[in-house]
Amino acid sequence: MSKIKIFADSTSDLSKNLIENNQISIVPLYVGFDDESYKDGVQITTKDLYTKVAEYDKLPKTSAPSPLDFVNAFKPFVEEGRDILYIGISSKLSSTLQNAKIAASEFPNAKIEIVDSFNLSTGIGLLVMKAVDFANEGMGVEDIAAKLRELAPNVETAFVPDTLDYLYKGGRCSATQALMGSVLKIRPIIKVVDGGMIVGQKARGKREKILETMLENALKDKDSMDKKRVFVTHTEGLEDANFLKEQLEKELDVEEVIITDAGCVISSHCGPNTVGILYILNEKI
């Protein structure tokens, strides 16, 4: 048994196989409709989410795990004498990380490292899997945490939503922007920069052309891209994800290109048929 226990939250969007095979523990965020609240990925699936959005005609509210949720998650492993490493969603997007820090303060005699990914979805997952790699190499928890903090700014996250409706309903674009996007077939390529989401590029035309633009952007980084793994993450957009995976495998010299499904929290902000490409740069250009 490794002395280090690695934690992430449900927004890391790692597959069940990656979680189970690498003994990663997940602390779920919450997704709520009116008075009902569900644990992301535990009590509600992405398909359930979209059914409820159609039923309620509004997006859910999402909320962070409480400090007590983190205390309950950490406690059994602290009692085993293990070191805790938690890699979480950007502190600029959620209070999840702050609640994890509050929980860590309840164990003053334990080694607990809380790492801000300054990212979302498998932008977090990339760092979690790097933590697994480093732990398997025998690195200590403090050294792993320091290395992850160095790598966090080098994570490249870009995704394309199929519709602006969810971004509009979630208050991330105006009604005018949503209407113009629909009429002119303009779709933003959303990027994560400094822990927040920005419109990195506005692409016009058929979805295939927009996907090719995102693919071209990623391939510009191929010489400086980390060779271990690249993620293609989607929400109900498997056909597009498979297309991107095939193209990336043809063009990149990486060990694996992994497709994962986005969980409910990420999907609630992006909408169905969103797809993204995520990777780590060896050096930030």
Image (spheres, grey):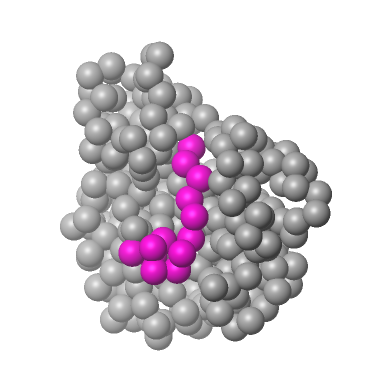
**Dividing the image into 4 quarters, which one contains the N terminus?**
bottom right
In the image: residue 86, left or right of residue 265: right
Please, which residue is most extreme toward the right here? Answer: 108
Asked if the stretch drawn in magenta spans residue 95, the answer is no
Q: How many marks?
A: 0
| Residue sitting nearer the eye, 7 or 226 | 7
Q: Is residue 265 visible?
A: yes
Q: Quadrant of the C terminus?
A: bottom right
In the picture as drawn, the residue positioned furthest to the top comes out as 35
219 w.r.t. 19: above or below: below
Q: Farthest front residue?
A: 79
Q: x%, y% of residue 255?
A: 39, 83
- Confirm whether residue 92 shows in the render: no
Q: Residue 23's spot in the image, x, y percent?
A: 46, 64
Residue 90 position in % (x across, y down): 61, 46
* Residue plotted at (71% across, 56% down): 112
Read off the magenta span.
17-29
Residue at the location (34% across, 58% down)?
16
Q: Is residue 238 left or right of residue 16?
A: left
Residue 21 shown in magenta: yes
Front residue of 48/250: it is: 48
Examine the image and state in which quarter residue 42 appears.
top left
Q: Is residue 195 above or below residue 170?
A: below
Q: Nearer the viewer, residue 38 or 211?
A: 38
Residue 251 x %, y %: 34, 81
Question: Hey, which residue is sitting farthest left in the picture?
Answer: 239
Quadrant position of residue 257 = bottom left
State the residue at coordinates (43%, 74%): 229
At a point 66% along the width and 55% down the height, the residue shown is 78
| 129 relative to 202 in the view: left or right | right
Residue 85 location, quadrant: bottom right
Using the image, determine if residue 206 lies above or below residue 258. above
